[in-house]
């Protein structure tokens, strides 16, 4: 979808459909010559209630009026959701060029252009790569931009920079969703590595190295290797570096879990839930696609991205309950549950990122089912061992519109992760704070570098937000980009 900004009035553009947001007890600033919009409000057909839609025709084009509620409660998420609803209606109406007229004189704390672009592009996303032409879902077509070919954002102020930035980030989110939604026989660890290399090829500031099984073993990554040994598919240690000219601030280490299919290993998952385990690489997808967006935006901050990609399968060579392995840090781990594999991969990847010079760490992973019972599909849980780094992450997530909630990193959680036959176990006893215990396990491998861990098991898939279709949500791409922006701004 082509996305542009203009300071012209929406009615002066070539759009065939114009969207106007209604705020409670406020007039429409630019009505049609015949007063059609005001008449729609007076008749009660158009309302300021959040998300309420009304359509009329005037001046040879369509007008979509969408409720935004009261000005005092308007925020970016309200605009994002409103834009998604408008996108859906515009698609039904056969719109090709949609123009959004932004509300006037909004608070400086809001990012209206960004929110409207994100809501539109995210809602327009369709994953049809494996559907034969003519066999798309009922009511759909094969246009992956949702039928709308162009979005114009109209405002009295020039929103070009905000619109361009939002389009880059939204497309990166959709690219992560493509990775999440791709069937596991197509998105193998090797294929995920190729995506990292493609990103590097697209930017002169990015390099990418991919190591297979032999390379992982050479680095002494016994924890990562144990997860991979049950599959015939080659694992992939994906290391991408972003080195912009004149960088500022600390080197950021972005680490992602990339389990392209998780059967649970010998602790096999129930069949009903296993079908969705292709999205267990969502953290890795977020890291790679955020890096792509950061490079496209040319942010002046250095990043080393490390993604551990593997399948977790069961077979004669699969890791067994009770096995003991040695991580790259020298820490020994008893494998009490083969379905707690993500933390094993991340342990070696976090240690590797520190060795590569990361001065601030953040890892992203669909790590624990327990987080769903704690925060549902509303918040991503996070843990941090440094308050300043936690504050930066939380502010970035709020700006990005991806809610996070900090959970405790207490020393007693670390105690329950101590092993009987090795330094650590990969699974705590039942009902001992599984998500927090897993975070404490990961903290062992961060080498004293300020670190945060994001558990996205509840927010990566089928979130129910109006701007996300079923399947992957690309969660944390927006936050990782916003975090890099904050670090760059602070220098």
Image (tube, rainbow, N blue to C red):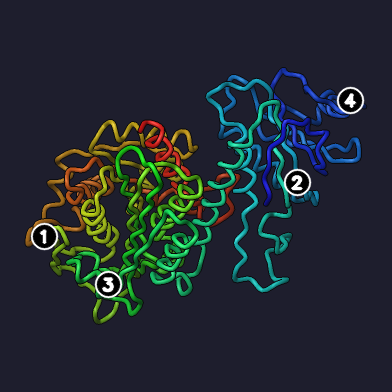
Of the residues under marks 4 and 3, which one precedes in the sequence?
Answer: 4
Q: Position of residue 418 (x, y in %)?
A: 11, 52
Residue located 25% across and 47% down the image:
439
Badge 2 marks a residue whose secondary structure is helix
Of the residues under marks 1 and 4, which one precedes in the sequence?
Answer: 4
Q: Residues within 10 Å of mark 3 (few under 14, many from 20)?
A: some
Residue located 47% across and 45% down the image:
298
Q: Are the two marked residues, 2 and 4, in contact with CB atoms closer than 8 angstroms? A: no
Of the residues under marks 1 and 2, which one precedes in the sequence?
Answer: 2
Q: Which residue does the numbered mark 4 point to in the structure image?
A: 35
What distance separates the C-alpha of mark 2 from that of mark 4?
22 Å
Q: Which residue does the numbered mark 1 point to in the structure image?
A: 330
Q: Position of residue 177 (x, y in %)?
A: 52, 57
As drawn, 113 above or below 416: above
Mark nearest the camera among 4 and 3 is: 4
Of the residues under marks 2 and 3, which one precedes in the sequence?
Answer: 2
Q: Which residue does the numbered mark 3 point to in the structure image?
A: 266
Residue located 84% across and 28% down the image:
37
Q: Which residue does the numbered mark 2 point to in the structure image?
A: 90
Badge 1 marks a residue whose secondary structure is loop
Of the residues under marks 2 and 4, which one precedes in the sequence?
Answer: 4
As drawn, 439 above or below 199: above
Mark nearest the camera among 3 and 1 is: 1
> Most extreme residue toward the front, as rendered?
246
């Amino acid at each position: 979808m082509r996305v542009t900004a203009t300071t012209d009035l929406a009615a002066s553009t070539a759009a065939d459909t114009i969207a106007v947001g209604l705020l409670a007890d406020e007039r429409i600033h630019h009505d049609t010559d015949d007063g059609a919009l005001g008449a729609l409000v007076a008749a009660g057909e158009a309302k300021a209630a959040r998300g309420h839609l009304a359509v009329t025709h005037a001046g040879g084009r369509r007008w979509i009026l969408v409720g935004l509620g009261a000005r005092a409660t308007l925020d970016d998420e309200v605009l994002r959701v409103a834009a998604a609803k408008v996108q859906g209606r515009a698609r039904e109406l056969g719109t090709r060029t949609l123009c959004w007229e932004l509300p006037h004189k909004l608070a400086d704390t809001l990012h209206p252009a960004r929110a409207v672009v994100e809501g539109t592009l995210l809602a327009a996303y369709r994953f049809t790569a494996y559907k034969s032409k003519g066999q798309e879902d009922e009511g759909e077509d094969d246009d992956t931009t949702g039928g709308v070919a162009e979005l114009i954002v109209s405002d009295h102020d020039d929103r070009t920079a905000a619109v361009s930035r939002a389009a880059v980030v939204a497309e990166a989110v959709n690219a992560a969703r493509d990775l999440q939604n791709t069937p596991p026989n197509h998105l193998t660890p090797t294929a995920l590595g190729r995506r990292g290399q493609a990103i590097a090829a697209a930017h002169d500031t990015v390099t990418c190295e991919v190591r297979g099984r032999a390379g992982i073993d050479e680095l002494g990554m016994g924890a990562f290797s144990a997860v991979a040994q049950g599959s015939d598919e080659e694992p992939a240690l994906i290391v991408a570096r972003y080195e912009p000219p004149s960088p500022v601030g600390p080197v950021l280490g972005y680490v992602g879990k990339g389990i392209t299919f998780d059967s649970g290993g010998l602790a096999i998952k129930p069949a009903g839930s296993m079908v969705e385990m292709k999205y267990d690489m969502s953290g890795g997808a977020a890291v790679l696609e955020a890096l792509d967006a950061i490079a496209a935006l040319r942010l002046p901050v250095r990043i080393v991205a490390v993604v551990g990609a593997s399948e977790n399968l069961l077979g004669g060579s699969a890791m067994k309950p009770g096995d003991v392995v040695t991580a790259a840090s020298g820490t020994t781990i008893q494998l009490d549950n083969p379905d707690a594999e993500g933390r094993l991969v991340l342990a070696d990847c976090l240690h590797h990122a520190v060795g590569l010079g990361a001065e601030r760490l953040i890892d992203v992973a669909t790590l624990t089912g327990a987080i769903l019972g704690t925060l549902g599909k509303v918040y991503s849980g996070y843990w941090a061992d440094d308050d300043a780094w936690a504050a930066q992450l939380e502010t970035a997530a709020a700006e990005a519109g991806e809610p996070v909630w900090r959970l405790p990193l207490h020393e007693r959680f670390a105690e329950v992760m101590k092993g009987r036959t090795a330094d650590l176990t990969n699974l705590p006893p039942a009902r001992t704070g599984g998500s927090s215990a897993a975070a404490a396990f990961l903290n062992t491998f961060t080498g004293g570098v300020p670190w945060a861990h994001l558990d996205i098991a509840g927010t990566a898939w089928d979130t129910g937000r109006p701007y996300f279709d079923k399947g992957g949500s690309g969660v944390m791409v927006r936050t990782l980009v916003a975090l890099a922006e904050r670090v760059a701004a602070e220098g």
